[in-house]
Image: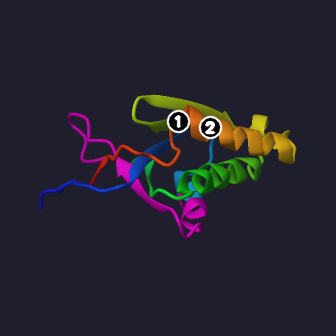
Amino acid sequence: MENVGYRCNVTQATIKIVEGRDSLDQLRNSLMSEPDLRVRPVTAPPRSGEMGSAADTLAVILAPGGAAVIFVSALVSWLRSRTSDVRVEVSHRDRKLSMTANRVSRLDGEDLARLVDSAVRELDLGDHAETDDVD
């Protein structure tokens, strides 16, 4: 069956664990505990000679009205709970942002709030006037 995209007033960010031993499933479960977030694993197309591949990325569907702040806050919270250093890369359209567990674990409340606001702005995740094609 063919996936048919549709246009609606949502946007999609992707997140990938690029360093560390933490499981993408752990991150997905943590993000899915937020009722305003829709999260799904994304698998890369198999390379030549491979039967298939495991999901290496999560797609997070963000509706307008604060879901971006909820997403970034949940991600920062998950990073702060890690016992080893983990680096994640978040992408939205042509923008990318990298965060590490080691960096965010040392921040206090005010610095965390600034980090979340900065990440939302840097990724252009605020209440989005443009829409994305979402499968």
Q: Residue furthest left?
A: 1
Give the residues drawn in magenta, as a range.
28-53
Q: Are marks 1 and 2 in contact (CB under 8 Å)?
A: yes
Say left or right for 1 vs 103.
left
Q: Position of residue 82 (x, y in %)?
A: 74, 49
Kind of residue at disc 1: Leu
- The residue under label 1 is 123
Q: Secondary structure at mark 1?
A: loop
Mark number displayed over residue 119: 2
Residue at 44% over, 46% down: 128
Determine if residue 85 is in view: no
Q: Position of residue 37 (x, y in %)?
A: 51, 62
Mark number displayed over residue 3: none
Q: Is residue 52 within the magenta segment?
A: yes
Q: Is residue 83 within the magenta segment?
A: no
Residue 92 falls in image quadrant:
top left
Quadrant, the C terminus: bottom left
